[in-house]
Amino acid sequence: MDPAERVQKVRASNGFAVVSLPESPTSGYLWELEEGSPAAVVERSLEQGPPPGVAGGGGFRTFRLKISQRLPATVCFVLRRPWEAEPLERRTFEIVCEA
């Protein structure tokens, strides 16, 4: 199994979870919460670009998720261009209660 395909755990606190994924928006590929992921809704999405002076470099997209289901719950993100149907990559996260 490809390491990017394994399920990663994310801890939720006070009904929210945060997921950060590497992204290079200049390529046209953007992360989004996959449709049909009823466990959470995106409250906020923040793009963090490359450091100043690094043209075309990658950055991160950070999602703040409002949990709408009992935990543990699973959410899936896809990396795709808006005009393409098939994603380049898919990442799955299991959201668990903060201990």
Image (tube, grey):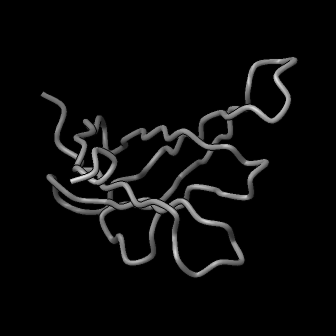
Using the image, determine if residue 78 lies above or below residue 98.
Answer: below
Q: Residue at x 48, y 62 (%)?
A: 78
Q: Residue at x 43, y 41 (%)?
A: 19
Q: Position of residue 31 (x, y in %)?
A: 56, 55
Tally of marks: 0
Seen from this angle, which residue lies furthest bottom? Answer: 85
Q: Nearer the viewer, residue 6 or 8?
A: 6
Q: In the displayed structure, does residue 50 sit left or right of residue 73?
A: right
Q: Position of residue 68 (x, y in %)?
A: 32, 62
Using the image, determine if residue 95 lies above or below residue 41.
Answer: above
Using the image, determine if residue 23 lies above or below residue 81.
Answer: above
Q: Residue at x 29, y 54 (%)?
A: 5
Q: Position of residue 90 (x, y in %)?
A: 40, 60
Q: Position of residue 89 (x, y in %)?
A: 46, 60
Q: In the displayed structure, does residue 52 sit left or right of residue 62?
A: right
Quarter of the image for the C terminus: give it. Answer: top left
Quadrant of the image occupied by residue 55: top right
Q: In the displayed structure, does residue 33 sit left or right of residue 76?
A: right
Q: Residue at x 61, y 47 (%)?
A: 45
Quadrant of the image occupied by residue 69: bottom left
Q: In the displayed structure, does residue 68 sit left or right of residue 49?
A: left
